[in-house]
Image (cartoon, helix red, strand yellow):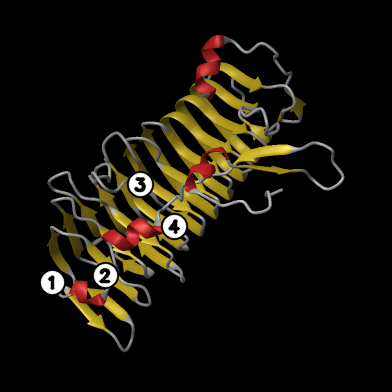
């Protein structure tokens, strides 16, 4: 309970916790409250005020105020300062559009995007000098559509005053990607991050991610027919999400599929190769998979509780490929309380986890 007469200050946020229990249960769960926004709206408005007057310096833009539409004309466009699209519009780009972000420039939008390239002439967004700040969409109220778009050689998107979570970020902005490519972004950040929204990614490739290829937070989505090649950290990470996976290939990552903090992931036809840890569920998460093949990995499947005040994880796999002969060192890891079922077989809990496995779950 909040004490009467409490005067709130930001200093109190550091120790703020939420205590709750399920109706009918006596067990109390305590969770720390995230006191820092995923994307800081106040900071956004200071750096990117989102006014149409700021578009006047970009001669390749066609602004239709009556139709509430902004068109990026086809061609090769070199951007050296931030391009900010205000709210209340729809931002369009078509085949044959190339955008080179240099001198720390980035694209930021408060409006939904409709970037539609083609297989023969995809839209390309890149950075020739290695300083571009990528693409960020925040609080766009309608669905964005990106088809045949390539995000290539965009570096870690950060500067002295701003720290973006990924090369491409959609926050509170529903989005669908189809036949897109993300790759070659350096060492420190994710390629794509979705937070607090609905999303779909189909027929797309993530290659040479410096850190995580795709991360989702508090989101609902689907991935279909996607490849994740050579991820520096995780190929897929879901935190508080509900996600469907279909026909996913992962080849090269420290961790393949990471499902944490009360997420639910359902998958079909998955292939995971060359990882330290192929599939892991933690802390009240649930993973249900069908038709999975894991090879060349330190650990194939893990269901564990990492946070003491959370709870166990559940993972059930049907039609899992036999691990014998597939260069898997440790097939299963299960912590007390968690449940792992593979091909209708309950996996025995090992109370004393080998030290060499503990670091994989940090």
Q: CA distance from mark 4 to mark 3?
A: 11 Å
x and y percent of residue 266 in the render? 63, 45
Question: Residue beneath label 2, please?
Answer: 94
Give the mark toward the camera: 2 or 4: 4
Name the residue carrying label 3.
166
Whether residue 318 is visible: yes
Which residue is the site of mark 1?
57
Question: Mark 2 near mark 1, Cβ–Cβ under 8 Å?
Answer: no
- Where residue 274 sits, quadrant-wise, is top left
Q: Quadrant of residue 29?
A: top right
Mark-to-mark CA distance, 3 and 1? 26 Å
Residue positioned 66% across, 11% down in the render: 352
Mark 2 or mark 1, which has the lower sequence index?
1
Q: Badge 3: how crowded within 10 Å, few (<14), some, or many (20+)?
A: many
Please, is residue 329 above or below residue 247 in the view? Answer: above
Q: For marks 2 and 1, give the CA distance.
A: 21 Å
Question: Disc 4 or 3, which lies upstream in sequence?
Answer: 3
In the rendered image, is residue 324 in sight?
A: no
Which badge, 3 or 2, is on the more N-terminal residue? 2
Q: Which residue is mark 4?
A: 171
Callout 2 crowding tier (Cα within 10 Å): few <14, some 14–19, many ≥20: many
SS under mark 2 = strand
Secondary structure category for the residue under label 4? strand
> Which of pointers 3 and 1 lies earlier in the amino acid sequence?
1
> In the visual, does 46 lie left or right of 30?
left
């Amino acid at each position: 309970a909040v004490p009467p007469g409490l005067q709130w200050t930001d200093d109190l946020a550091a120790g703020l916790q939420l205590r709750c229990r399920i109706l009918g249960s006596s067990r109390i769960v305590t969770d720390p409250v995230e006191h820092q926004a995923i994307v800081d709206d106040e900071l956004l408005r200071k750096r990117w005020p989102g006014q149409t007057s700021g578009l006047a310096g970009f001669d390749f833009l066609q602004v239709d105020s009556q139709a509430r539409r902004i068109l990026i004309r086809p061609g090769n466009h070199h951007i050296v300062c931030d391009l900010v699209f205000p709210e209340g519009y729809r931002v369009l780009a078509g085949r044959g559009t190339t955008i080179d972000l240099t001198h720390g420039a980035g694209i930021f939008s408060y409006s939904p995007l409709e970037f539609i390239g083609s297989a023969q002439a995809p839209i390309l967004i890149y950075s020739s000098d290695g300083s571009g700040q990528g693409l960020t969409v925040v609080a766009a109220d309608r669905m964005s559509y990106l088809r045949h778009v390539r995000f290539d050689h965009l570096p870690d998107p950060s500067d002295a005053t701003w720290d973006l979570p990924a090369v491409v970020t959609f926050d509170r902005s529903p989005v669908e990607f189809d036949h897109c490519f993300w790759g070659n972004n350096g060492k420190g950040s994710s390629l794509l991050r979705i937070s607090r929204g609905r999303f779909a990614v189909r027929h797309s490739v993530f290659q040479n991610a410096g850190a995580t290829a795709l991360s989702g937070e508090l989101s609902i989505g689907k991935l279909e027919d996607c490849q994740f090649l050579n991820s520096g950290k995780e190929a897929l990470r879901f935190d508080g999400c509900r996600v469907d996976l279909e026909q996913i290939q992962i080849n090269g990552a420290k961790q393949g599929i990471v499902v944490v903090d009360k997420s639910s992931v359902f998958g079909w036809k998955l292939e995971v190769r060359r990882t330290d840890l192929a599939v892991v569920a933690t802390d009240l998460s649930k993973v249900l998979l069908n038709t999975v093949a894991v090879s060349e990995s330190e650990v194939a499947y893990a269901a564990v509780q990492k946070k003491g005040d959370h709870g166990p994880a559940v993972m059930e796999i049907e039609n899992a490929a036999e691990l014998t002969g597939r260069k898997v060192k440790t097939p299963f890891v299960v912590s007390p309380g968690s449940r792992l079922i593979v091909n209708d077989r309950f996996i025995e809990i090992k109370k004393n986890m080998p030290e060499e496995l503990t670091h994989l779950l940090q």
